[in-house]
Amino acid sequence: MNTHAHRPHSERLYQEALQHIVGGVNSPSRSFKAVGGGAPVFMKKASGAHFWDVDDNRYIDYLAAYGPIITGHAHPHITEAIAKAAANGTLYGTPTTLEIQLAKMLKEAIPSMDKVRFVNSGTEAVMTTIRVARAYTKRNKIIKFAGCYHGHSDLVLVAAGSGPSTLGIPDSAGIPTSIAHEVITVPFNDADSLKAALDKWGSEVAAVMVEPIVGNFGMVMPKPGFLEDLCRLAREYGALVIYDEVITAFRFHYGSAQTFAGLSNHEAIKPDLTALGKIIGGGLPIGAYGGSKEVMEQVAPLGPAYQAGTMAGNPASISAGIACLEVLQGEGVYDEMNRLATRLTEGLASSAAQYGVPLTINQIRGSFSAHFCNHPVTNYDEAQDTDGEAFAAFFRHMLDQGINLAPSKYEAWFLTTAHTDEDIDLTLTAAHEAFKRMGSG
Ligand code: PMP
């Protein structure tokens, strides 16, 4: 049943793209390098939970553009908002009332933010929170967690040294070792390592930065007490806490991880600064950061930490963001995504078991990760210790049957408000076939 295996136009366009665009893609995560190479699928249209490629194959989409498309593609409420914004002029370089409206919506949903600033991407948001934390604390180092991705600015593209007491090494060419030496990387869900790092470097640490629920080596919940320990330890040493909620904000409920019912003790896990992106722009470029009034007053024009942006707060992105959040305020939308995700994960687990394919599923409401292994995945080491070849085989079997997943074993599956039971049925039929081909049964 390889109904979608024939993709000659994608093959041809990929060869053409390679002539003009570095690697043929505008973000490395779109290449098929991690799943054995070859041409990625060139899509020409998207609507609801579906994609159509340039060879006219239809796909059910679980990539959701790596997260932002939580209402499905081309949601009418969002496309109308964008069209209206475009008709009124796409960029002013002056303040608008729209920005106030979205800022208020974000503050209401994420009460740790007294003040907000809009930027253009998650990368910018995170990069600026670090600058603000450094300005506020007058310290330079940051602590981050292995496997958490925070965008592509220099400071956060740094890998672990050989333990909590060593400084980082650059993860990319072009990042000076002197910058990597400002970063310490420790394992997620390991408060003892964090304490060891703070014992050694505490007086120099400006901030501890974390994805409070991880979305970048699968979906991984913090162990009970981990975020409480993280916040307590950071404060003990005079460091700020930065939550990177670029994936998690508005993902599991109308709010963010720091106010998610799945994590208790919200007062004890409150961050000083939060970085946002993805969903809050409804599919257009956006980022935002916010925090307590005192910390945010470091930012220009009030304070000495400079951050600016020609495109920041542009009416199209802000209008799309407002419209997206309005859709997410709808009755029961998150429960429905959770219901469909649960049907999907139960079906995947049962087919995998039937054919003897080891699979660990981490589901958090309407999103989940499926790891080809038979151990739990609670940190990056465990996520790495999974069968990449099995994932690549599964990915290709699914793609060839019209199911679009991210081409990486570390990425999540995202349900949207547009998925239906019929989509889930078709996906489970394809998955059953994929596991059958892979397994022993
Ligand atoms: N932080 C997290 C947690 C992310 O997942 C990402 C993107 N995947 C970023 C930051 C960077 O966001 P952007 O790609 O919009 O720059």
Image (cartoon, rainbow, N blue to C red):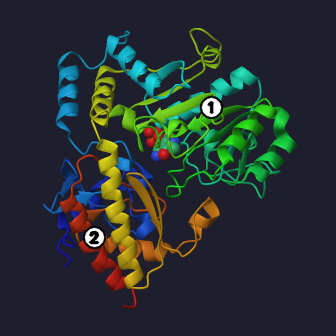
Quadrant housing the N terminus:
bottom left
Q: Position of residue 59 (x, y in %)?
A: 21, 60
What secondary structure is marked by label 1? loop
Q: Is residue 70 left or right of residue 7?
A: right
Q: Is residue 385 above or below residue 27?
A: below
The amino acid type found where label 2 is placed reads: Leu
Q: Nearer the viewer, residue 228 or 62?
A: 228
**Quadrant of residue 178 in the image?**
top right
The residue at the point 37 percent across, 17 percent down is 99
Observer-side mark, 2 or 1, equals: 1
Residue under the point 41% across and 43% down: 251
Q: Is residue 111 above or below residue 172?
A: above
For label 2, the residue is: 428
Q: Can I make out residue 70 in this image?
A: no
User: Residue lying furthest bottom in this view?
Assistant: 441
Q: Which mark is residue 267?
A: 1
Mark 2: is the Cβ under 8 angstroms from ligand 1? Answer: no
Q: Position of residue 397 (x, y in %)?
A: 30, 75
